[in-house]
Amino acid sequence: MTQRAKIALIEIPGLDLNQSDLDRSVSCSQHISTTVPRGLGDPHVSVNFRATPPIMGYNAIRQSQGPVALFFEFFCNRLLQSEELIIIRYVDISSGKDYLNRPIITDSLSKFFITSPKFTEPIFYFSRPPQASVVIGLNQDVYSEVNLNFIRDQKIQLSRRFAGGGAVFVDPGNLTYVFIDNDDGSNYGDFKRYAQPVISTLKKLGVDAKMTGRNDLTVDGKKVSGMSALKIGDRFLCGGTLMADVDLAKAAKALTPPKVKLQSKGIKSVHSRVTNIRQYFDPKYKNITFEELEKRILLTVFRVTDIRDVPTYTMTDDDWKDVLKIADQAYTGDDFVMGTKPNDDYFRGRHFDGVGTVEISFSVKNDVVTHAKIYGDFNNPNGDLAAIENHITNVPFAKDSLEEAFRISNLEANIGKITPPDMADLMLKEKYDLK
Amino acid sequence: MTDKADDSKYLWEEKTSERHTRIGLNDLARSEIGQVTFAEFPEKMTELSVGDPMLSFEGAKAVTEIHSPMSGKVAKVNSDLIEHPELLNEDNRDRTWIVELF
């Protein structure tokens, strides 16, 4: 806490505060900017709920509001304008090694940090999967995205995340870094801000990583890290996954994305566009361990030179119980992961810039759409896809009728910024065939 | 009603929340057609003008087709009627509508 306050103080010349003032005013740092990356895939979700945080645990310190604290808070809010990443606390999750064997726990953990009243400040943590798994996005068709035979043979776990985004392969060779922060109106979706500490750490290790597109880190044009974001209420996660020693051959075999996505990016295969970052490290860092890498990132995130100065919170048994509760409530078994295998006449898809890939599996009988199911890696957790599917069922398989059906489907709220004519086209034109 | 293009007295029309118009058979039509055992939509029915056929069917008392009372593009057709033509004997607009125009 003190650490954090010190960091904030540096930014405010001429303000003379004693330590108790600083402690009382720690709440302001919550309003300061933030940055955080997390898992893979693509971004942007928001779910409608937010627990009102009761004051407890280390948050108790945020209660008092003396005049000096208010004054200080005012300055902090002004500071908000600067796009600085200020993270309050590192959370050590190593006590949950056994739980993390289940990929669903990783997802539940981030939900816990966003929604639990125990955590209201910006926080940061790492996670590294103990074993290989494929994680698909909320709206994806597992049968077209994943080589199910291969992952069964290789004993690779399969899971579906609560948020949208694309299918990813993770194994102990990648390091996920996650920031949890509060929305200040400008920080949510600002991937660059949350990638910055990682980019600068990599630079010190001799790697010139660049932010490419909206949320990828690339070296030599190859992706070494993907980022994603998830928002629940006013709090969100922004994180990324660094590939260091990932089994790329396995990843390439496990993931079988429909051709549309890769075509949109002008690339031939999954395999050729992602790579491990280790090969780019300066020779003297070639054998750097994950622990050392984590340490270096932590020092950068918290802007300290000694790891002991990083304010650390260790997950307790009670915390893990809460995480397991979230997993149990949300996880509805194999159906949630596998979905229903599409058995339609058509499967067409297209990549829309800024939205992602949208696919429709549908059947047509006597020139009328008789069944439709929408898939994709777009990230819109509140979207009501069933409503759209309803609107396009029983509609003549013709341009005007389909456009009208999509017009009344509120595409922007349910998928993203896509026009009704584009969606009608997607269904009508052979060039979008993915079968 | 058989060969007449103006079937409006046999039909109900209702606006949906999307400002489309749903059309279906009313009591008078049902009493003249009798138990319906088969129904079929015209092919490629994407647009209708007044008097265009919108559904043909076989009833106990009549084998005929019903014509659109208005012009418009077809937003939806009630495909359930093909599988379950007996629905047409019911007086339930949510289940027995024939077409929706816009």
Image: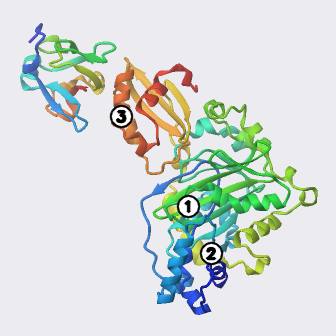
Residue A164 location, x and y as percent?
54, 48
> Which quarter of the picture shows residue A103?
bottom right
The number of discs equals 3
Left or right of A107 on screen, residue A205? right
Going from the N terminus, do you reach mark 2 or mark 3 first? 2
Q: Find numbered disc 1 in the image and state the secondary structure of the residue it sits on.
A: loop
Which of these two is toward me, B7 or A176? A176
The residue lying toward the viewer, choosing from A377 and A336, is A377
Query: Which of the 4 quarters of the picture holds residue B9?
Result: top left
Q: Are marks 1 and 3 in contact (CB under 8 Å)?
A: no
Identify residue type, mark 2: Ile
Q: Nearer the viewer, mark 1 or mark 3?
A: 1
At label 1, the amino acid type is Asn
Residues flagged by tags 2 and 3 on a common chain: yes
A322, above or below B46, in the image: below
Labels 2 and 1 positioned on one and the same chain: yes
Distance from disc 2 to disc 3, alpha carbons, whole Å, reads 45 Å
Where A163 falls versus A82 (above or below)?
Answer: above
Instruction: Measure the C-alpha gap from mark 2 to mark 1.
Output: 16 Å
Q: Residue A214 location, x and y as percent?
A: 62, 47
Which residue does the numbered mark 3 point to in the structure image?
Answer: A407
Helix, strand or loop status at disc 2: loop
Q: Mark 2 or 1 closer to N-term?
A: 2
Label 1 sits on residue: A187
